[in-house]
Image (cartoon, rainbow, N blue to C red):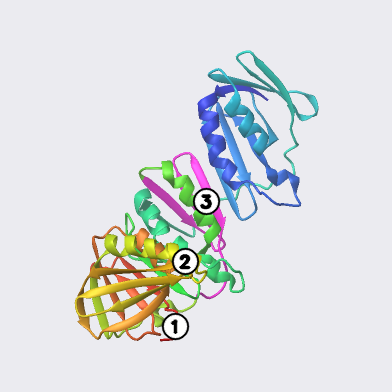
Amino acid sequence: MKFDCSKDNLINALSLVSRGVANKTTMPILEGILFQVYDNQLFLTSTNLEISIQTAIPAHTEQDGEVILQSNFISELVRKLSGDDVFFELLDHYQLKMDCQLSSFTIKGLPTREFPEFPEVIDDYNFVIESSELKSLIHGTIFAVAVKENIPVLTGLKLEMEDDRITMIALDGYRLALRRGKLKEAINEPISIIIPGKSMSELDKLLSNVNGDVQVHLSKTQIFFEMGVTQFTSRLLEGEFINYKHIIPSEKNTEIVIERRLLLESAERAALLARVGKNNLIKMEIGIDQLTLSSNADIGDVKEVIPIEKTGDELRIAFNSKFVIDALRVLNQDKILIDMTTPVGPAVILSDDDSFIYLILPVRVSE
């Protein structure tokens, strides 16, 4: 193997694929990145057996070949090199010689025979989505994915697709986040899958520098995202997702319209005391035309008044401040609707265009 490539291109490619490297593993080979050179391209691949990432950059190739290099070391080394181009030559016993301007290194690589193959794309189903739409769906739901693994399917995001509509749902037992979006083209039949939340978090990071369409391919066990020369694949979760539609109340006794920014800023200030009190609790008292938000702890207390438009009953209710703030931060509407039933019934934050629904369970408090 003998080739050279742009240092800047290599840095960018390594930063992408390093997200798929296993951190804690009994298989040292998964801590490495697979370097493959052919067709005047350098292909970089990583996997932790749950996700796999592959990308490619142009390379001037004198001899094809492949080797595995330790991810953290090669990424840090390339970033610290001076010069514009890096020259590689694979010597005997998987020793890789690297030259860049006045620097020369020889580092130990690993044979590639035990490295898992990049999953083959099987087109049982496929669809296309705009990258900005996919990012919005992930941002708007990922925070509500369950962290504890006692119910494995809740550690994932549920995707439902029908015609040209896509819905993403997360549920952790205390709150529900639902966002709706559009596909570029209608699909032939409805699809419902569950993708691990950790996989979608890594995909979200990859999408930060992606514009344009994302090609998505599905098999029975895998999902593949193609973003230009970069491919990202994740296994799917098996099992039945909770019937979230039955959780969302169909009735309401109180409905308010409120400015999102005012409620968010008040909740963030109140949360400072809520965290000191170690209960993360904020209380809301809904009157005729105002919402009074309060929190208290040994260090002090806070009370803020926000104007609202109310329909229905007055109400006192309390929430975990983090759940409220998480939902409000991912919204971009100036005004939001909040529907409530009783002090112990869930509150539902929603838009008038049906693009999002956030459900939060209240906290029982003594009067």
**Residue placed at 59% from the left, 42% from the top?**
18
Q: Is residue 6 visible?
A: yes
Whether residue 1 sits left or right of residue 275 in the image: it is right
**Residue that sits furthest to the right in the current view:** 93
Disc 1: which residue: 365
- Marks 2/1: CA–CA distance: 20 Å
The quarter of the picture where the C terminus appears is bottom left
Q: Identify the mark at residue 272; answer none if there is no mark.
A: none
Q: Is residue 279 above or below residue 365?
A: above
- In terms of secondary structure, what is the magenta stretch mainly? strand
Residue 109: x and y, percent? Answer: 74, 33
Disc 2: which residue: 299
Tell me the amino acid under the disc marked 1.
Val
Tell me the amino acid under the disc marked 2.
Ile
Q: Is residue 57 above or below residue 27?
A: above
Q: Residues within 10 Å of mark 3 (few under 14, many from 20)?
A: some
Residue 318: x and y, percent? Answer: 40, 77
